[in-house]
Amino acid sequence: MSAALSLDAWKSQASSLSYRNQAFIDGKYVDAASGETFDCINPATGEVLTKVAAGDKADIDRAVKAARTAFEKGSWSQMAPAKRKKILQKFADLIEKHGTELALLETLDMGKPIRDSSSIDIPGSANCIRWYGEALDKIYDEIAPTGPEAVAMIRREPVGVVGAVVPWNFPLMMAAWKIGPALATGNSMVLKPAEQSPLTAIRIAELAAEAGIPDGVFNVVPGFGETAGQAIGRHMDVDCVTFTGSAEVGKYFLKYSGESNMKRVSLECGGKTPNIIMADAPDLDAAATAAAWGIFFNQGEVCNAGSRLIVEESIKDQVIEKVMAVAEKLRPGDPLDPKTRMGAIVDKTQMERVLGYIEAGKGEGAKLRMGGGRVNTDKGGFFIEPTLFDEVDNKMKIAQEEIFGPVLSTISFKDADEAIRIGNDTIYGLAAAVWTRDITKAHKAARALRAGVVWVNCFDAGDITSPFGGFKQSGFGRDKSLHAMDKYTELKTTWINVGA
Ligand code: NAP
Ligand code: MG
């Protein structure tokens, strides 16, 4: 696509970019019913990119009505699978075709390096939607093994209207993980992007329409969590909420459901991933490089960021030196520069939150070995340097709470049992990693670690074929893989008496 463009070329494209900034409801861009807007800010400069429609309850009502009408009409829900497949594939093609523009929107909107948005976020989102498009006409229903007097068919049906509420760290990709399986299974959707990063979601709505997704099937309503997000959660005619975000807000959605129509909820929430490096790791350079990338990639704004480096005492100093050597090269820079590997923190609030955790770490007695400060202040943006703490106790705030920034806490252990115990000693269970050349130790650790994914001798590996999601307060339900389709389908048994 566009990875080969220079900084000047990206800048010139950025200067001629136009922004879609309204809600997309029933096949049309519309203002919020209230006429309200909010500022969409570029976190690398602090400048306002555009003003975006601030959708609220009235707009969610309109979008849900359109989604329900389309669902009942069957224009998508009853479409032949082979046709639905073609449309989703075209949707994926269009995302790819507009990859340069979408990558720019993502980078300008939330501060991630253009290198990543153009090579990971946008192609990954297109791939996800295409994968579910391809899968949808290859899944068969079941006939139950009843006695001869009956035929019992077990069919999957779409749940109906799906409300998707997503975060700002991978704005399009987190949305695609919902859009792919929800649309592939025949549902209608209302998507609410995060207020910090609504631009790509708004833009792809018209690409969905261009691909042939009928009016009302895919709606996008930008707005605030407390208004638009809550309205989705409490809506009496939304059948299912699929959420990615913090555990705190995830819990609100459970409450909204219980206080409204008992809608199905699936939650992909935060993490405090233990990255356990044993002294017998096969390659310490590889482990340290992965540890650095595992926390500093995407400015540390990653739900499965390896924020706890749990390392065997005998190799700790060596590993820290190696991690710091890699991190040295990851100085935050202009997200539009293709050489930049770390960009801006998404907004001022998040930057202050991260800096607050760094202060808390120092206050609790952890030893700051690297970074710890705001940088590039002359650019007007929100940048934090890669930060590493040593001598962290797992009870400290920086080891227990999700920081969602480039801050690594190093904790040492003496034996494998202690490593597992520390690894599991958190409210979260999204991911974990273990580095060892001992296959028995690796298997034991993989079984004992309470997490939705355990990496052995790698970090943050995976693709669309494997499920992703959490144990404990990292939530429940899985994105990616065929398992994600479970969230968006109801099982129906049709029992036919043939014994008469
Ligand atoms: P967040 O504050 O929980 O927000 C997520 C979404 O929920 C946003 O669209 C937000 O809207 C909305 N929201 C906020 N308050 C709400 C409320 N009271 N009612 C209904 N909706 C509400 O999370 P974030 O700060 O955007 O993202 C960071 C979090 O996402 C981290 O905890 C991270 O671990 C998690 N995450 C998890 C995964 C995973 O797969 N497990 C992946 C990525 C991120 P507004 O922001 O527009 O107000
Ligand atoms: Mg923004």
Image: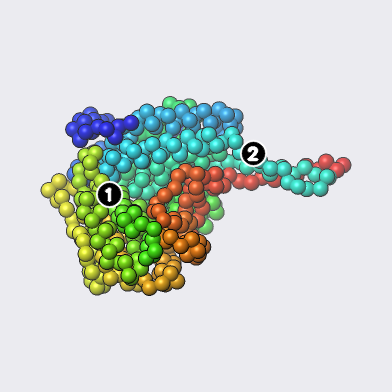
Image quarter of the C terminus: top right
Going from the N terminus, do you reach mark 2 or mark 1 first? 2
Q: Which mark is residue 346?
A: 1
Image quarter of the N terminus: top left
Badge 2 marks a residue whose secondary structure is loop
Visible in this render: residue 180? Answer: yes
Task: List x then y, in percent, for residue 391.
Answer: 28, 70
Task: List x then y, in percent, for residue 300.
Answer: 30, 54
Q: Which residue is drawn at 25% across and 50% down?
A: 345
Front-lying residue, 444 or 82: 444
Q: Respond yes or no on whether mark 1 lies under 8 Å from ligand 2.
A: yes
Q: Quadrant of residue 316?
A: bottom left
| Eye-nearest disc, 2 or 1 | 2
Task: List x then y, in percent, for residue 341.
Answer: 25, 46
Front-lying residue, 410 or 467: 410
Q: Which colour scheme is used?
A: rainbow
Q: How far apart are marks 2 and 1 (CA)?
A: 43 Å
Q: Which residue position is annotated with label 2?
A: 140
Q: In which quarter of the image is residue 409?
A: bottom left
Visible in this render: residue 75? Answer: no
